[in-house]
Amino acid sequence: MNNALFQPIQLGKLSLNNRIVMPPMTRSRSTQPGNVPNEMMAEYYAQRASAGLIVTEGTQISVMGQGYAWTPGIYSAEQIAGWQKVTKAVHAQNGTIFAQLWHVGRVSHPDNIGGQQPISSSALKAENVKVFVDNGNEPGFVDVVIPREMSKADIEHVIGEYRQAALNAIEAGFDGIELHAANGYLINQFIDSEANNRTDEYGGSIENRLRFLGEVVAAMTQAIGADRVGVRLAPFTSLNGTVDATPIDTYIAAAVLLNSLNVVYIHVAEVDWDDAPETPTVFKDTIRDVYKGVLIYAGRYNGENGSQAIDAGVADMIGFGRPFVSNPDLVNRIKHNYPLASHNPETLFGGGERGYTDYPEYSPS
Protein backbone atom coordinates (compact mmCIF):
# COMPACT_ATOMS: atom_id res chain seq x y z
CA MET A 1 0.00 0.00 0.00
CA ASN A 2 1.93 3.13 -1.15
CA ASN A 3 -0.90 5.55 -0.38
CA ALA A 4 0.62 8.33 1.73
CA LEU A 5 -2.62 8.50 3.76
CA PHE A 6 -1.62 5.23 5.43
CA GLN A 7 1.79 6.30 6.69
CA PRO A 8 1.93 6.70 10.47
CA ILE A 9 2.52 10.21 11.84
CA GLN A 10 3.53 11.76 15.14
CA LEU A 11 1.14 14.42 16.52
CA GLY A 12 2.85 15.87 19.56
CA LYS A 13 3.31 12.89 21.90
CA LEU A 14 0.65 10.87 20.04
CA SER A 15 1.53 8.22 17.43
CA LEU A 16 -1.26 8.03 14.85
CA ASN A 17 -1.84 4.99 12.63
CA ASN A 18 -2.76 6.92 9.50
CA ARG A 19 -3.16 10.44 8.18
CA ILE A 20 -6.92 10.41 7.73
CA VAL A 21 -8.84 12.90 9.85
CA MET A 22 -12.52 12.87 10.68
CA PRO A 23 -13.14 16.62 10.91
CA PRO A 24 -15.79 18.36 13.04
CA MET A 25 -19.36 17.93 11.80
CA THR A 26 -22.36 19.25 13.70
CA ARG A 27 -24.98 16.51 14.12
CA SER A 28 -27.17 18.01 16.89
CA ARG A 29 -27.95 14.86 18.84
CA SER A 30 -27.08 15.79 22.42
CA THR A 31 -29.55 14.86 25.17
CA GLN A 32 -31.99 17.57 26.26
CA PRO A 33 -32.23 19.48 28.46
CA GLY A 34 -28.60 20.29 29.17
CA ASN A 35 -26.93 19.61 25.78
CA VAL A 36 -25.34 16.44 27.21
CA PRO A 37 -23.34 13.96 25.08
CA ASN A 38 -24.81 10.47 25.23
CA GLU A 39 -24.37 6.75 24.47
CA MET A 40 -25.58 7.20 20.90
CA MET A 41 -22.84 9.76 20.27
CA ALA A 42 -20.31 7.42 21.87
CA GLU A 43 -21.33 4.67 19.43
CA TYR A 44 -21.16 7.05 16.45
CA TYR A 45 -17.60 8.16 17.19
CA ALA A 46 -16.42 4.66 18.15
CA GLN A 47 -17.68 3.35 14.79
CA ARG A 48 -15.29 5.83 13.10
CA ALA A 49 -12.30 5.31 15.41
CA SER A 50 -10.12 3.87 12.62
CA ALA A 51 -9.43 7.48 11.54
CA GLY A 52 -5.93 8.57 12.50
CA LEU A 53 -7.56 11.48 14.31
CA ILE A 54 -11.19 12.28 15.15
CA VAL A 55 -12.13 15.88 15.88
CA THR A 56 -15.56 16.13 17.49
CA GLU A 57 -18.41 18.31 16.39
CA GLY A 58 -18.22 21.89 17.61
CA THR A 59 -18.76 21.89 21.37
CA GLN A 60 -19.79 25.13 23.06
CA ILE A 61 -17.60 26.35 25.91
CA SER A 62 -20.45 28.17 27.68
CA VAL A 63 -24.18 28.91 27.51
CA MET A 64 -23.35 32.06 25.51
CA GLY A 65 -21.23 30.05 23.10
CA GLN A 66 -24.18 28.11 21.65
CA GLY A 67 -25.46 28.95 18.18
CA TYR A 68 -27.85 26.12 17.36
CA ALA A 69 -30.29 23.94 19.26
CA TRP A 70 -29.18 20.51 20.50
CA THR A 71 -25.40 20.94 20.07
CA PRO A 72 -23.30 19.55 22.96
CA GLY A 73 -21.46 21.64 25.54
CA ILE A 74 -18.38 21.06 27.69
CA TYR A 75 -18.97 23.39 30.63
CA SER A 76 -21.20 21.38 33.02
CA ALA A 77 -20.38 18.29 35.10
CA GLU A 78 -23.08 16.34 33.21
CA GLN A 79 -21.56 17.30 29.85
CA ILE A 80 -18.06 16.27 30.96
CA ALA A 81 -19.46 12.92 32.16
CA GLY A 82 -21.24 12.50 28.81
CA TRP A 83 -18.03 13.14 26.88
CA GLN A 84 -16.25 10.57 29.07
CA LYS A 85 -18.54 7.94 27.54
CA VAL A 86 -17.45 9.10 24.07
CA THR A 87 -13.72 9.16 24.75
CA LYS A 88 -13.83 5.76 26.50
CA ALA A 89 -15.64 4.22 23.53
CA VAL A 90 -13.16 5.69 21.02
CA HIS A 91 -10.11 4.70 23.07
CA ALA A 92 -11.51 1.16 23.40
CA GLN A 93 -11.20 0.99 19.61
CA ASN A 94 -7.63 2.39 19.76
CA GLY A 95 -8.76 5.74 18.36
CA THR A 96 -7.47 9.26 19.03
CA ILE A 97 -9.99 12.05 19.63
CA PHE A 98 -9.76 15.83 20.09
CA ALA A 99 -12.67 18.04 21.21
CA GLN A 100 -13.43 21.03 19.02
CA LEU A 101 -14.03 24.00 21.34
CA TRP A 102 -16.56 26.45 19.99
CA HIS A 103 -17.98 29.86 20.75
CA VAL A 104 -20.29 31.10 18.01
CA GLY A 105 -20.29 34.78 19.01
CA ARG A 106 -22.88 36.62 16.92
CA VAL A 107 -24.06 33.49 15.05
CA SER A 108 -26.80 32.88 17.59
CA HIS A 109 -30.19 34.01 18.81
CA PRO A 110 -31.50 34.86 22.31
CA ASP A 111 -33.66 31.69 22.19
CA ASN A 112 -30.48 29.58 22.23
CA ILE A 113 -28.63 31.48 24.99
CA GLY A 114 -31.15 31.99 27.76
CA GLY A 115 -32.65 35.18 26.34
CA GLN A 116 -29.37 37.11 26.31
CA GLN A 117 -28.00 39.21 23.44
CA PRO A 118 -25.16 37.46 21.56
CA ILE A 119 -21.66 38.92 21.83
CA SER A 120 -19.07 39.62 19.13
CA SER A 121 -15.99 41.63 18.28
CA SER A 122 -18.31 44.41 17.10
CA ALA A 123 -22.00 45.32 17.06
CA LEU A 124 -22.32 44.12 13.45
CA LYS A 125 -25.08 41.71 12.46
CA ALA A 126 -24.12 38.69 10.35
CA GLU A 127 -26.00 39.37 7.12
CA ASN A 128 -28.27 36.69 5.62
CA VAL A 129 -27.47 34.20 8.39
CA LYS A 130 -30.04 32.00 10.13
CA VAL A 131 -29.68 29.64 13.11
CA PHE A 132 -31.75 26.71 14.30
CA VAL A 133 -33.68 27.27 17.54
CA ASP A 134 -35.92 25.15 19.73
CA ASN A 135 -37.82 27.56 21.97
CA GLY A 136 -40.58 25.20 23.00
CA ASN A 137 -42.74 26.02 19.97
CA GLU A 138 -42.00 24.53 16.55
CA PRO A 139 -38.18 24.10 16.17
CA GLY A 140 -36.89 25.95 13.10
CA PHE A 141 -34.57 28.52 11.56
CA VAL A 142 -34.61 32.19 12.55
CA ASP A 143 -32.52 35.22 11.63
CA VAL A 144 -29.61 36.09 13.89
CA VAL A 145 -29.77 39.39 15.80
CA ILE A 146 -27.41 42.34 16.23
CA PRO A 147 -24.76 41.35 18.78
CA ARG A 148 -23.28 43.40 21.60
CA GLU A 149 -19.67 44.51 21.16
CA MET A 150 -17.49 42.75 23.74
CA SER A 151 -15.88 44.91 26.43
CA LYS A 152 -12.34 44.22 27.69
CA ALA A 153 -13.94 42.45 30.65
CA ASP A 154 -15.98 40.27 28.27
CA ILE A 155 -12.81 39.37 26.37
CA GLU A 156 -11.00 38.36 29.58
CA HIS A 157 -14.04 36.36 30.67
CA VAL A 158 -14.29 34.42 27.39
CA ILE A 159 -10.54 33.69 27.39
CA GLY A 160 -11.10 32.18 30.84
CA GLU A 161 -13.98 30.09 29.49
CA TYR A 162 -11.78 28.72 26.70
CA ARG A 163 -9.06 27.87 29.22
CA GLN A 164 -11.55 26.07 31.49
CA ALA A 165 -13.08 24.22 28.52
CA ALA A 166 -9.62 22.93 27.58
CA LEU A 167 -9.15 21.63 31.13
CA ASN A 168 -12.66 20.11 31.03
CA ALA A 169 -11.79 18.34 27.77
CA ILE A 170 -8.77 16.69 29.35
CA GLU A 171 -10.90 15.73 32.36
CA ALA A 172 -13.37 14.18 29.90
CA GLY A 173 -10.59 11.98 28.51
CA PHE A 174 -9.86 13.77 25.23
CA ASP A 175 -6.36 13.48 23.76
CA GLY A 176 -6.38 17.19 22.96
CA ILE A 177 -8.52 20.05 21.71
CA GLU A 178 -9.07 21.96 18.48
CA LEU A 179 -9.89 25.65 18.73
CA HIS A 180 -12.62 26.56 16.24
CA ALA A 181 -11.29 29.80 14.74
CA ALA A 182 -13.06 29.32 11.39
CA ASN A 183 -16.40 29.57 9.57
CA GLY A 184 -17.56 32.92 10.88
CA TYR A 185 -17.71 32.11 14.60
CA LEU A 186 -16.38 34.24 17.48
CA ILE A 187 -12.60 34.02 16.94
CA ASN A 188 -13.16 34.51 13.21
CA GLN A 189 -15.28 37.60 13.99
CA PHE A 190 -12.16 39.20 15.48
CA ILE A 191 -9.80 38.02 12.71
CA ASP A 192 -11.71 39.04 9.57
CA SER A 193 -11.57 42.73 8.75
CA GLU A 194 -15.19 43.11 7.62
CA ALA A 195 -16.58 41.64 10.87
CA ASN A 196 -14.41 43.76 13.18
CA ASN A 197 -14.69 47.56 13.37
CA ARG A 198 -13.07 47.96 16.79
CA THR A 199 -10.71 50.88 17.38
CA ASP A 200 -8.84 49.43 20.39
CA GLU A 201 -5.96 46.93 20.45
CA TYR A 202 -8.32 44.17 19.18
CA GLY A 203 -9.21 45.92 15.91
CA GLY A 204 -7.70 47.65 12.89
CA SER A 205 -4.35 46.12 11.92
CA ILE A 206 -3.87 42.42 11.21
CA GLU A 207 -1.76 42.13 14.36
CA ASN A 208 -4.58 43.62 16.45
CA ARG A 209 -7.26 41.45 14.88
CA LEU A 210 -5.18 38.34 15.66
CA ARG A 211 -4.67 39.37 19.28
CA PHE A 212 -7.76 37.59 20.64
CA LEU A 213 -6.79 34.37 18.81
CA GLY A 214 -3.30 34.57 20.30
CA GLU A 215 -4.54 35.23 23.83
CA VAL A 216 -7.05 32.35 23.71
CA VAL A 217 -4.44 29.92 22.37
CA ALA A 218 -1.86 31.05 24.95
CA ALA A 219 -4.36 30.49 27.78
CA MET A 220 -5.19 26.99 26.55
CA THR A 221 -1.62 25.88 25.84
CA GLN A 222 -0.61 27.10 29.29
CA ALA A 223 -3.43 25.04 30.79
CA ILE A 224 -2.99 21.73 28.94
CA GLY A 225 0.23 21.97 26.88
CA ALA A 226 0.80 23.18 23.32
CA ASP A 227 1.22 19.59 22.14
CA ARG A 228 -2.50 19.04 22.82
CA VAL A 229 -3.84 22.19 21.11
CA GLY A 230 -4.70 22.46 17.40
CA VAL A 231 -6.44 25.34 15.61
CA ARG A 232 -8.90 25.34 12.72
CA LEU A 233 -8.82 28.25 10.24
CA ALA A 234 -10.91 28.99 7.14
CA PRO A 235 -8.97 31.66 5.23
CA PHE A 236 -11.07 31.87 2.08
CA THR A 237 -14.61 31.06 3.15
CA SER A 238 -17.28 33.66 3.82
CA LEU A 239 -19.45 31.34 5.90
CA ASN A 240 -21.77 33.03 8.38
CA GLY A 241 -21.00 36.44 6.96
CA THR A 242 -17.34 36.98 7.83
CA VAL A 243 -15.09 38.27 5.07
CA ASP A 244 -11.48 39.42 5.19
CA ALA A 245 -10.15 42.07 2.80
CA THR A 246 -6.65 40.51 2.58
CA PRO A 247 -7.03 36.82 3.45
CA ILE A 248 -3.58 35.69 2.29
CA ASP A 249 -1.78 38.32 4.38
CA THR A 250 -4.09 37.84 7.37
CA TYR A 251 -3.88 34.08 7.51
CA ILE A 252 -0.16 33.83 6.81
CA ALA A 253 0.24 36.16 9.81
CA ALA A 254 -2.07 33.83 11.79
CA ALA A 255 0.14 30.85 10.87
CA VAL A 256 3.27 32.76 11.97
CA LEU A 257 1.55 33.55 15.28
CA LEU A 258 0.41 29.95 15.81
CA ASN A 259 3.92 28.71 15.00
CA SER A 260 5.32 30.97 17.71
CA LEU A 261 2.77 29.48 20.14
CA ASN A 262 3.84 25.93 19.14
CA VAL A 263 0.33 24.60 18.49
CA VAL A 264 0.46 20.97 17.45
CA TYR A 265 -1.51 21.45 14.22
CA ILE A 266 -3.26 23.92 11.96
CA HIS A 267 -6.41 22.57 10.30
CA VAL A 268 -7.29 24.53 7.16
CA ALA A 269 -10.92 24.29 6.05
CA GLU A 270 -10.96 24.88 2.29
CA VAL A 271 -14.02 26.03 0.40
CA ASP A 272 -15.73 22.85 -0.75
CA TRP A 273 -18.78 23.68 -2.81
CA ASP A 274 -18.77 22.32 -6.36
CA ASP A 275 -17.41 25.29 -8.35
CA ALA A 276 -15.41 26.78 -5.48
CA PRO A 277 -12.06 28.37 -6.30
CA GLU A 278 -8.93 26.44 -5.38
CA THR A 279 -6.91 27.61 -2.38
CA PRO A 280 -4.05 29.68 -3.91
CA THR A 281 -0.82 27.70 -4.27
CA VAL A 282 1.17 30.66 -2.96
CA PHE A 283 -0.85 30.47 0.26
CA LYS A 284 -0.25 26.73 0.73
CA ASP A 285 3.48 27.08 -0.01
CA THR A 286 3.90 30.02 2.36
CA ILE A 287 1.98 28.36 5.22
CA ARG A 288 4.27 25.37 4.84
CA ASP A 289 7.31 27.66 5.08
CA VAL A 290 6.19 29.60 8.16
CA TYR A 291 4.46 26.88 10.21
CA LYS A 292 6.48 23.92 11.44
CA GLY A 293 3.76 21.77 13.02
CA VAL A 294 1.33 19.29 11.44
CA LEU A 295 -0.78 20.75 8.63
CA ILE A 296 -4.25 19.31 8.03
CA TYR A 297 -6.37 20.26 5.01
CA ALA A 298 -10.06 19.43 4.64
CA GLY A 299 -12.16 20.13 1.56
CA ARG A 300 -12.81 18.31 -1.68
CA TYR A 301 -10.46 15.40 -1.07
CA ASN A 302 -10.59 11.75 -2.01
CA GLY A 303 -8.06 8.95 -1.50
CA GLU A 304 -6.11 9.91 -4.60
CA ASN A 305 -5.75 13.68 -4.34
CA GLY A 306 -5.40 13.46 -0.55
CA SER A 307 -2.44 11.14 -0.94
CA GLN A 308 -0.97 13.44 -3.61
CA ALA A 309 -1.22 16.47 -1.29
CA ILE A 310 0.81 14.60 1.35
CA ASP A 311 3.36 13.35 -1.21
CA ALA A 312 3.75 16.91 -2.51
CA GLY A 313 4.56 18.12 1.00
CA VAL A 314 1.58 20.50 1.07
CA ALA A 315 -0.31 18.63 3.80
CA ASP A 316 0.57 16.15 6.55
CA MET A 317 -2.98 14.88 7.14
CA ILE A 318 -6.25 15.11 5.21
CA GLY A 319 -9.78 15.59 6.57
CA PHE A 320 -12.74 13.85 4.94
CA GLY A 321 -16.01 15.35 6.18
CA ARG A 322 -19.23 14.17 4.57
CA PRO A 323 -17.86 10.74 3.52
CA PHE A 324 -17.42 9.90 7.23
CA VAL A 325 -21.14 10.49 7.84
CA SER A 326 -22.23 7.51 5.75
CA ASN A 327 -19.02 5.45 5.76
CA PRO A 328 -18.04 4.58 9.33
CA ASP A 329 -15.31 2.36 7.82
CA LEU A 330 -14.07 5.11 5.49
CA VAL A 331 -10.42 4.32 6.25
CA ASN A 332 -10.87 0.73 5.09
CA ARG A 333 -12.85 1.82 2.01
CA ILE A 334 -10.11 4.22 0.93
CA LYS A 335 -7.45 1.58 1.59
CA HIS A 336 -9.15 -1.03 -0.60
CA ASN A 337 -10.75 1.37 -3.07
CA TYR A 338 -14.23 0.18 -2.12
CA PRO A 339 -17.16 2.36 -3.28
CA LEU A 340 -18.44 5.01 -0.89
CA ALA A 341 -22.03 5.15 0.34
CA SER A 342 -23.78 8.51 0.08
CA HIS A 343 -25.43 10.14 3.09
CA ASN A 344 -29.06 11.05 3.61
CA PRO A 345 -29.18 14.87 3.90
CA GLU A 346 -32.51 14.70 5.77
CA THR A 347 -30.93 13.02 8.81
CA LEU A 348 -27.82 15.16 9.21
CA PHE A 349 -29.12 17.30 12.07
CA GLY A 350 -31.17 16.14 15.03
CA GLY A 351 -33.12 12.91 15.39
CA GLY A 352 -31.94 9.52 16.58
CA GLU A 353 -29.96 6.55 15.29
CA ARG A 354 -31.39 6.73 11.78
CA GLY A 355 -28.84 8.36 9.50
CA TYR A 356 -26.38 8.49 12.40
CA THR A 357 -25.24 5.12 13.74
CA ASP A 358 -27.06 2.85 11.24
CA TYR A 359 -24.80 3.24 8.19
CA PRO A 360 -23.24 -0.20 7.58
CA GLU A 361 -19.62 -1.06 6.92
CA TYR A 362 -18.83 -2.23 3.40
CA SER A 363 -19.17 -5.92 2.72
CA PRO A 364 -17.98 -7.19 -0.68
CA SER A 365 -20.89 -9.18 -2.11
Image (tube, rainbow, N blue to C red):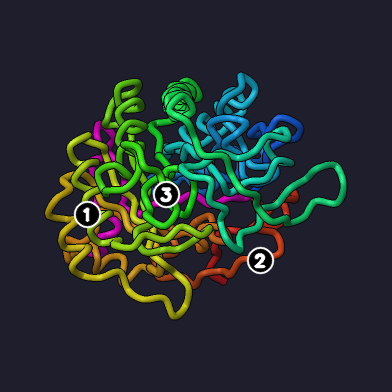
Query: Which residues lie in the magenta part?
Result: 1-27
Q: Residue furthest bottom?
A: 275
- The residue that mark 1 highlights is 252
> First in sequence: mark 3 or mark 1?
3
Q: Identity of the amino acid at label 2?
A: Pro
- For the point 85% across and 51% down, the residue is 138
Above or below, 40 against 247 in this view is above
> First in sequence: mark 2 or mark 3?
3
Q: Identity of the amino acid at label 1?
A: Ile
- For the point 43% across and 44% down, the residue is 180
Q: Is residue 5 magenta?
A: yes
Above or below, 357 against 64 in this view is below
Q: Identity of the amino acid at label 3?
A: Asn
Element type at mark 3: loop
- For the point 55% across and 64% down, the residue is 363
Residues under labels 3 and 1: Cα distance? 19 Å
Residue 157: x and y in percent read 47, 24
Q: Nearer the viewer, residue 35 or 185?
A: 185
- The residue that mark 3 highlights is 196
Q: Could one spot residue 170 in this view of the protein?
A: no
Q: Is residue 338 left or right of residue 8?
A: right
Residues under labels 2 and 3: Cα distance? 34 Å
- The residue that mark 2 highlights is 345
Element type at mark 2: helix
